[in-house]
Amino acid sequence: MSTSSQPEPVTGSDDASTPPRFGPGRVVQSGLNRSPSSAVAYRLLDLLLGESMRPGDRLPGERALAEELGVGRSAVREAISALEVLGVVETRAGSGTYLRSNTSELLPSTLSWSLLMDQERTSELSVVRGALERSAAQLAALTATDAQKAELAGLVEAQRAAADDPEGYVAADVAFHRVLAQIGGNALVGELLATTRTLLRVWFDRAVDRREDIDRAIAEHELIVEAIASGDAVAAGDAMERHMATAAERILRDSSPES
């Protein structure tokens, strides 16, 4: 695919009655606080929805995209990571990044795009996740067996062991919250949490790129496990609520336009 023709950014029209041309713009209008990577992702989606590419086509390299879009290569990498999370593209080691979905398959994903790529929607989704996680913690405190309590404690230890490995820590963190939801026994809560984590996953790595953030999260997880171990649903819910508040702060800090 040639990069000589720069795609137009996805923005709202000056005339409020005129909808944007492509999918995401129909859900997320202009004027919202988008990070550089969000803007790049919308430009790329504009290109894909404009049928300039077909499934299996290779995207231009990071440098070419950065120059064409007038952004840094890090913003391009983050945007491509977001596309990959949604299954729109795939990165092949030593080969490049390729389009996976055709345009008709992309259109139903516009809500996902709005949630994932926009800071305002990220904030809203963090609130939803917090409420679900609180419920999951309360349920776990009421239902956890001794074996399940030990499993949660072990997952916190796995996080501590991976504290100097952000990728390993994120994997252990995701496992902790997934197991906690399973212990609660409410399948719908678990499914909804899995969806919110998927949509927020693009920010997780950036939100724990500082050792002090990891240490704080581990300490918060310990308090949650202690409350669950004691069977105190109120304390478990409160501990999870505090944890979700600081987690949301980290995610929003690292999804802000200035970050």
Image (spheres, rainbow, N blue to C red):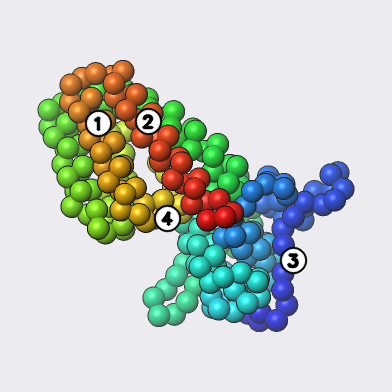
Distance, label 4 to label 2, CA atoms, is 20 Å
Answer with the quarter of the image where residue 246 lies: top left
In the image: residue 215, left or right of residue 19: left
Q: Which residue is mark 2?
A: 242
Distance, label 3 to label 4, CA atoms, is 28 Å
The residue lying toward the viewer, choosing from 71 and 38, is 71
Of the image marks 4 and 1, the number of the one nearer the N terminus: 4
In the image: residue 195, left or right of residue 256: left
Q: Which residue is mark 4?
A: 206
Q: Quadrant of the N terminus?
A: bottom right
Distance, label 2 to label 3, CA atoms, is 42 Å
Residue at the spot 48% in from the left edge and 38% down from the top edge:
126
Distance, label 1 to label 2, CA atoms, is 10 Å
Q: Nearer the viewer, mark 3 or mark 4?
A: 4
Q: Amino acid at mark 4?
A: Arg
| Contact between labelled residues 2 and 1, with CB atoms less than 8 Å apart | yes
Image vertical order of residue 140 relative to residue 243, above or below: above
Query: Residue 234, how many percent across, how many down?
Result: 31, 18
Numbered badge on residue 223: 1
Q: Which residue is mark 3?
A: 8
